[in-house]
Image (spheres, rainbow, N blue to C red):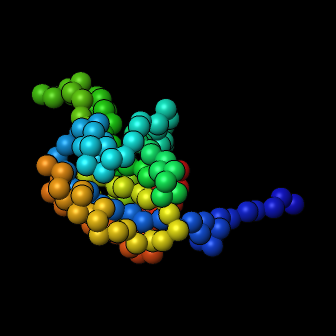
Amino acid sequence: MTAIYKITENLYDETFALVALHSSLEDYALVYALNLHLKSGFKRCFTDLDLSAEVSFPIFEWKDKIQHRYWTLISNSSSTLQNIDQGGLFQNESTYTKHYLIPEYKEVDFFLKIEQDETEVEEEVLNMIHGIPKVVTAYTIPIDRLKSKNNLIF
């Protein structure tokens, strides 16, 4: 007889704050702007977050040693190229399929995960993010209502 282990909600009890960012910037340009305005040091991770063999999301991280926080910026969407092999007018055409890290927030472009003792983000941080050109808005998302919270475990 084999044992079956299940991961429960109580096992992952890490406190973090989640900020949703709406921006038309590419991920590297947004990281540059965040580093400039927040005086942060975001860098691209060597490995991406792989949800499956086809779906991966690039991760940018910064360890704030002064405030004892770990910041992570990750895109909410990822596109994969698929070749459709059909007969007819559009045979051998490729198409892109879009996947979302947090599907219940499809309109969000990026997520900023701040691992800290509190689950609230200071208003000063949000105001500095609002000051970045081409960032339309930034707001906090309550973590307890997320259905796809397990996708943020990385």
Residue 144, percent from left and from top: 45, 75
Residue 82, percent from left and from top: 31, 33
Residue 125, percent from left and from top: 30, 62
Determine the residue located farthest toward the right in the rendered image.
1
Determine the residue located farthest toward the front in the rendered image.
66
Q: Residue at x 44, y 45 (%)?
A: 62
Q: Residue at x 83, y 58 (%)?
A: 2
Task: Kindly tell me whether residue 2 is visible in this rendering.
Answer: yes
Q: Is residue 4 left or right of residue 138?
A: right
Q: Quadrant of residue 42?
A: top left
Up-down relation of residue 96 to residue 38 (above or below): above
Q: Residue at x 24, y 58 (%)?
A: 128
Residue 3, percent from left and from top: 81, 61
Closer-to-camera residue (108/117): 117
Q: Count the marks.
A: 0
Q: Quadrant of residue 6?
A: bottom right
Task: Kindly tell me whether residue 86 is visible in this rendering.
Answer: no
Up-down relation of residue 110 to residue 57 (above or below): below
Q: Residue at x 24, y 38 (%)?
A: 29
* Quadrant of the image containing the N terminus: bottom right
